[in-house]
Image (cartoon, helix red, strand yellow):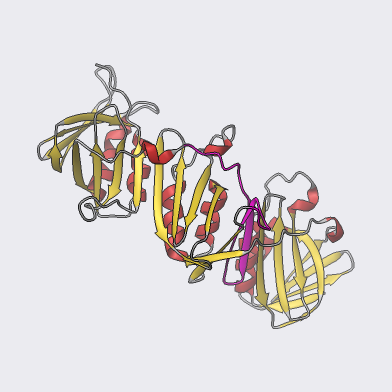
Amino acid sequence: MMFRVDRDVLAEAVAWTARSLPARPSVPVLAGMRLEVTEEQQLKLSGFDYEVSAEVTLDLQTGEAGVVLVSGRLLAEITRALPAQPVDFVVDGAKAVVTCGSARFTLLTMPVEDYPSLPAMPPAAGRVGSDVFASAVAQVATAAGKDDTLPMLTGVRMEIDGDTVTLAATDRYRLAVRELKWQPDQPDFQAIAMIPGRTLADTAKSLVTGAEVEIALSSVGGTGEGMIGFSSSGRRTTTRLLDPEFPKYRSLLPTQFSCHADLVTSAFVEAVKRVALVAERNTPVRLAFRGDEVVLEAGSGDEAQAVEVLPVEFTGDEINIAFNHQFLLEGLSAIDSDVARLQFTTSTKPAILTGGKPVEDGGIPDYRYLIMPIRLSS
């Protein structure tokens, strides 16, 4: 087996494939990256850890068909460090030789016959713009739980109903929901999938090189059940799904509010960051909304304290409320709008953060971030 390919093209493909390799593989062979040159003069690089698979296909300048398995992370480090010249890759017995300009590396190969076969992609279900998809996933994944002892809270729930996709995630302290449009292959397609949050966020961010992302997902009872696939511009990845159990989140989203506040997002973010400098890890930032201003406070009489006042467009009953400052900042960074709107019912019930002033009266924003307040001691 041998091939020649441009250094930048190879380095990018190897780095993309290597990101899915396990840091501590259960068996040594899973640390490998499989390289296959096909009869069609294409190079396929793939990685698989029994949960997530990744494969990228490249067109070659020249190549001889064959398959080899080498250390994926080592190959990624080598290709990243090579000079900007064509790369020659040749398999010689139990070794693979990488040559680029005056640089030459020899890698030991691994037993390719011990490597697991990549799962087949589920049936294609539809397409969505890659930028829109990456943005929507990032907005929602920020609220996914990080505690692996509660696996159902570490995922992002994807609900598909016709041409509408709804993404939702919660860690019990906040909830993020985003709706977006896509192009289903079947107009009446319906499906629900619980996708590992970290995997989905990494995948969506890494597929923006193409204009669209194709989503491959089986409907109930179809082939590929329990798995979802994404592909774009010669890259494809699959991941196993989590148990679909998820809180009935729609009932948690309030629709009636006693007051709302509109603030300049950038100024609000900077003020929260400054005030939070004196907030201990689990102490809140307090917000007091009065007329045309909001007073931000943190700390208490026995500790360092911070106070800052910001202008606000406020409507409704005055309110004192407190939030975990990190959760508030993560919500503000996700709304992607110059204006942040906070909507309240009472100081002890969840608030809703959205971007911009509302769509028409009675309309629902496509992104909502629910955040639980921290009860203030009286």
Relative to 113, is 13 on the left or the right?
A: left
- The residue lying furthest to the right in this view is 93
- Between residue 82 and residue 313, name the one nearer to us: 313
Confirm whether residue 214 shows in the render: no
- The residue lying furthest to the bottom in this view is 61
Stretch of the chain drawn in magenta: 221-247
Relative to 268, is 172 on the left or the right?
A: right
Confirm whether residue 262 shows in the render: yes
Relative to 134, is 216 on the left or the right?
A: right
Residue 167, image x, y percentages: 45, 50
> Residue 66 falls in which quadrant of the image?
bottom right
Residue found 46% across the figure and 36% down from its top: 171
Q: Is residue 152 magenta?
A: no
- Between residue 260 and residue 64, name the one nearer to us: 260
Check the picture and name the quadrant holding the C terminus.
Answer: top left
- The residue lying furthest to the left in this view is 291
Residue 145, image x, y percentages: 50, 38
Residue found 32% across the figure and 54% down from its top: 336
User: In the rendered view, would you say 364 is above or below 307?
Assistant: below
> Residue 280 falls in which quadrant of the image?
top left
Relative to 65, is 51 on the left or the right?
A: left
Check the picture and name the quadrant holding the N terminus.
Answer: bottom right
User: In the rendered view, would you say 161 is above or below 25?
Assistant: below
Q: Is residue 243 magenta?
A: yes
> Residue 202 falls in which quadrant of the image?
bottom right
User: In the rendered view, would you say 97 is above or below 138?
Assistant: below
Residue 158, image x, y percentages: 50, 51
Residue 318, image x, y percentages: 14, 31
